[in-house]
Structure formats: structure tokens, C-alpha cells
Image (cartoon, rainbow, N blue to C red):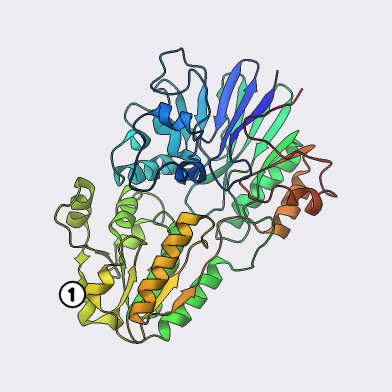
Amino acid sequence: MTSITCYGGVAEIGGNKFLVEDLGTRVFLDFGMDFSRRRQFYSVFSRPKSCSDLIEFGVLPRMSGVYDYDNSSCDIDAVVLSHAHMDHFQCISLLKRDIEIYASEQTIQIIQAVMDTRREGIENSLSGLKFKTFYNGRPFKVGDIEIIPFEVDHSIPSAHSFILHTSKGPVAYSGDFRLHGRGVRLTRNFIAHAHKEKPLVLLCEGTNISEGDRNTERDVLKEASEIVGGSNNLVFAYFSAVDIDRLRSFYRVAEDTNRRLAISCKQAYVLGKLKNQKGIGSFLTKDILCVFKRKKRHYEKWERAVHSNFECVEAVDMKNEQNRWIKISTMYDLDEMLEIRPNPGSVFLFSASEPFNEEMEEDFSRLRNWLGHFGVPLYNVHSSGHMMPIDIRSAVSQMNPRKLIPIHTQSQGFYKTFLHDVVSEIVEPQLGHTYSLD
């Protein structure tokens, strides 16, 4: 039997876990955390004590021979990771250590950096995991399934889509992708190859299927430069620590406006892991970039490493010369504003996705309270990491799958009205259900 079972990424954004079975070979496409489900039982400050707790609450699928605590024989051949966002990889730490995990070199490096900067626990341990590296465009085999990775454009380096050759025919998996970033040609290359393969099934993400915008990374650069250029005081900005494209944009903004860019310790640690990758080293050769050093009683080992490898600045440095800085902030270090005391005319550039769950909305509300207290206006300057509605329609039409399964979306029902004339069969997946390719 050849089949796909949806254990995550169904009617939600993230948590991707798709099991492909063919001729006795069993491969997971991504193994991400279902954060929406996890938030129902744990806060950011509480952690599960065991893997079985996460299974009890439905955060993880109830499967034997998969998890590290389970003494039964291994029942999965491999996990293939599309990229290093936690909603696609976070749960690999819970897997049995004899399951091979395939990922690109950059993805492995970013995962290691992200995990190093998190609190120790069962959800954040890479010890003993068996990573194997794949390369863009080079087929590799897991049992009877041949897999071809295609690098695509996304808001993190080295994101990949895949085409899997099964005994019944090709299966295409989008992972997360877009057609409006710096790597558009990469995504178009995947779409062209999928068109040639004539996939039986396309697992297609639709984060933005029901609403979109036309902002590109160039728009972010232009808008941010204009806003920063119009401010004569401190500029705060927020974006993902692993969004290297966005870091490039703000680096350019700092250059264009004669400012210095103070990144977070976590961003610096990720850069350090990627320093040998093409284009990353250029960030480290000029004196534009430095690291903001927070005042703490105790610094973790990884933080001390960053402090010794990067030039560091503190709140007092910014307070005295506010018109010289762009400070990259997070939702968890807003108390630094108390030390810096931003002058009138300071601004905050929010350069990430708008909140789409209760916890994110609380964080965003807290941010607005801080900014309101200090009289700092907020600008939304963002380009999504996900494909826009018309682009999804065009991509699906070109790939022309026999069957489409909407994933990584809160609007899976929207596909049937928006795409019914470009694909013959659209299956709205249900969590835990198996769909046969026979």
C-alpha cells in the first residue's frame, strides 16, 4: 500500500508531520511542534516532564516505535526536514536515536544554533540524533522511496520542497515557499520540475491562501530606509532571529542611513554558525554590525561565546547617542527601554507576521503598552515568508497534480472554491487520517 497519513499541519499553521508509506518504507516529511495544541496545556515557562505527557494531551501522535522513551522496535525509516523553523522540526528531539534525519547542511546548523539557545529539556535535546545531509537537486533514497530536494524561497536560508518517487507515482511536498523573495528563481525551478513529474498528489501549504499582499523584500528595504531616514532618534526593530534575508535588508538600511545595527545575542549566535556559508561572512567584515549585551546576573555558555567573538554594546551606549542606532529587539527584552529611555522621535519597526493565536496577541498587546508608555510609534514593515493567493493558484496550475491536499493553513476549505477549476480533486485532510495512493 502507498499512502500519506497527516499527523500534523492540518487546519493549522505549522506542526507539519506527514508520513509517506510505500512498499514497507516509512518516511516522515517534517516533524514539527504543534504549538497551538501545546499552548492549551503548557505556557512558555512550563515544560512537559516526559514524551508521554505530550502524547497524552495530543501534542504528539500516539505511535509505537517512534519516540525515544519507547522500547519497541523502530518503526520509521527516516525524517526529512524541509527547513529550520520550529513548527517543522521541533519534535525531532523526541525521536528514537536510530531514526535517520535528513536535512541540508545549513538547516542542521541553524537547528543546532536554535537548540543551543533554548532551555534544556526533552523538547530541546539533539544529543544522539543521526543527521544526514542532502544537497539541492541531488536525489537520495530512503528504502524504496527516492527523494529529490529543491531549494525554494522562504524567510529562512536553505528551505526545500521535495518530490518523492513512490511505486505508484510522484508525490510533491511544498514545505514552506514563496514567489516574492530574493530566491524566486529557486521556487520556479521546483514548480517546473514538479510540472514535468506530473505528481499524483501535491501537499501544498496555504498560510496566505485567503488573503495576501504584494510586499516584497525590496519593499521592506525601501520602506524601512525611508522611515529610519526620517527619524532623528533611536530606531527599534523586530524580526525573526533566523530570517537572514530580513537581516540583510536592515543591514542595508543601517548602511544607507549612516547608523549601526545592534542585533540580539541569539541572532549573532546563528550568524556565527553560518559564517562559512556564502554571503554570510560579509556581515562580519564591517563595523556596522555589533551585538546588544543585556545586563544579566548570569550568562549562558553560548552567550559568553558571542560576547567574546563580537563587538558588544550596552544600553548606556545607545542612551547617549540615540540617533546612531538601529536596535533589534525581541518580545522578551522590552524592559531595556527603561534603561535607554528613548527620546521623542524614536520609532519601532515591526517586521514579522501579525499575531495569529492568543499568546502572540498577548505579546503584541504587551509591546503596544510599552511603546505607548514611551511614546514610540509602531510601523508594520514586512514581507511574508509564504506564497500569496494568486501565486498559489498559478503554481498549482503549473504543477497540475491529480490530487491536492491543503496543508499548513487555517483556511483549507478556501481551496475548493479558489482552485476548483485548476485541479481536479482537492482533499480536505483530517488529523490522523490516511489517504491511499493506490
Q: Is residue 104 visible?
A: no
Q: How many numbered marks does the figure carry? A: 1
Residue occupied by mark 1:
316
Could you tell me which residue is drawn at 39 percent across and 68 percent down? 367
Taking depth in this image into account, of 267 and 319 the one nearest to the observer is 319
Q: Position of residue 81 (x, y in %)?
A: 50, 37
Q: Secondary structure at mark 1?
A: helix
Above-or-below relation of 315 to 296: below
Place residue 124 in its image quadrant: top left
Q: Position of residue 192 (x, y in %)?
A: 71, 46
Could you tell me which residue is drawn at 25 percent across and 79 percent down? 341
In the rendered image, which quarter contains the N terminus? top right
Q: Is residue 385 visible?
A: yes
Q: Position of residue 49 (x, y in %)?
A: 34, 32
Above-or-below relation of 124 to 289: above
Taking depth in this image into account, of 104 and 91 the one nearest to the observer is 91
Q: Position of residue 127 (x, y in %)?
A: 31, 30
Assess disc 1: are there few (<14), some (14-19) or many (≥20) residues with their C-alpha within 10 Å of its C-alpha: few
Taking depth in this image into account, of 96 and 371 the one nearest to the observer is 371
| Residue 283 as seen in the image, left or right of residue 221 | left
Q: Residue furthest left?
A: 297
Q: Amino acid at mark 1?
A: Val
| Residue 402 as seen in the image, left or right of residue 391 | right
